Image (spheres, rainbow, N blue to C red):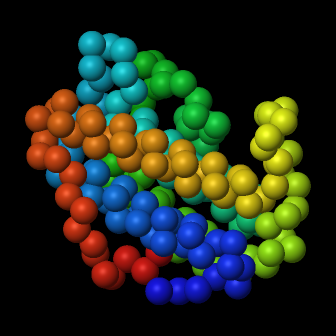
Amino acid sequence: MDTSRSAQLNMIIPAYRMHTQIFMNALDGISEEDALKRIEGRTNHVAWMAGNFVNTRYGLAGVLGINEKDPFDDLFFQGKALDTQVTYPTLSELKANFHKISPVVYDALLKITDTRLKEEVPLHMNISFFPETLLNFIGMCIGREDYLCGQIGLMRRILDYPGMKYDVDEQLKY
C-alpha cells in the first residue's frame, strides 16, 4: 500500500482506494437506460448519483490545488438537485472522467503534509464542532462517496440487478 506523507491520512488512503473499487463495482453491468430510471419519480437516478460521486472527486481536486474542472460541474456541483429537464451524461462518460481525475487526486493525497491539512477551507457551514480545515474537507468527501455508493448499491437491487460485489481490481492503483 502507498503511504501518505501525513500519518493523519493513513486511514483516508485505503478508504479512497476502496471507494474507487466500490464505485466501479456498484456501476458494473448497469445499462445506460436503467441508469436514468427513477423510483416512482421521487429518487435520483444512478446517472445523477454517479455524476455527483465524480464531481466530489473533482471538488477535492480543486481544493488540493489541481487545476482540473469537471466537464459536468453545472449538473452536479455541491449536490445540485436532479433536474428532470436536463440530459445527463452517460455512465461511460462519467466513468471516463472518474478515471481521469481519481489518480491525480490520489497522488496529491499521498503528498499532503500535516501543515497543509491544517489549512482553512471555508465551507461556511457554521457548525461549532466542525473546524473547516483541509483534513475535515477530505473526510467529508470520503463520507459523501460512502453515501453515494450506498445509494447506487440500493438502486442496483431495486432495478433487479444482483447485489454489488466487493471484488478488487488490482490494476486500479488509485
Which image quadrant for residue 42?
top left
Q: Is residue 146 above or below residue 25?
A: above
Tally of marks: 0
Can see residue 38? yes
Most distant residue in the front direction: 129
Residue at 86% across, 74% down = 115
Which image quadrant for residue 62?
bottom right
Locate residue 3, reporting x and y percent. 58, 86
Q: Is residue 111 left or right of residue 72?
A: right
Q: Is residue 3 left or right of residue 15?
A: right
Q: Is residue 58 above or below residue 171?
A: above
Residue at 59% across, 30% down = 80
Residue at 68% across, 79% down = 7
Q: Is residue 33 left or right of residue 100?
A: left
Locate residue 15, reporting x and y percent. 48, 65
Which image quadrant for residue 89?
top left
Residue sitting nearer the eye, 93 or 51: 51
Locate residue 36, reporting x and y percent. 30, 31
Locate residue 114, reporting x and y percent. 80, 75
Can see residue 51? no
Residue sitting nearer the eye, 152 or 132: 132
Residue at 37% across, 22% down = 43
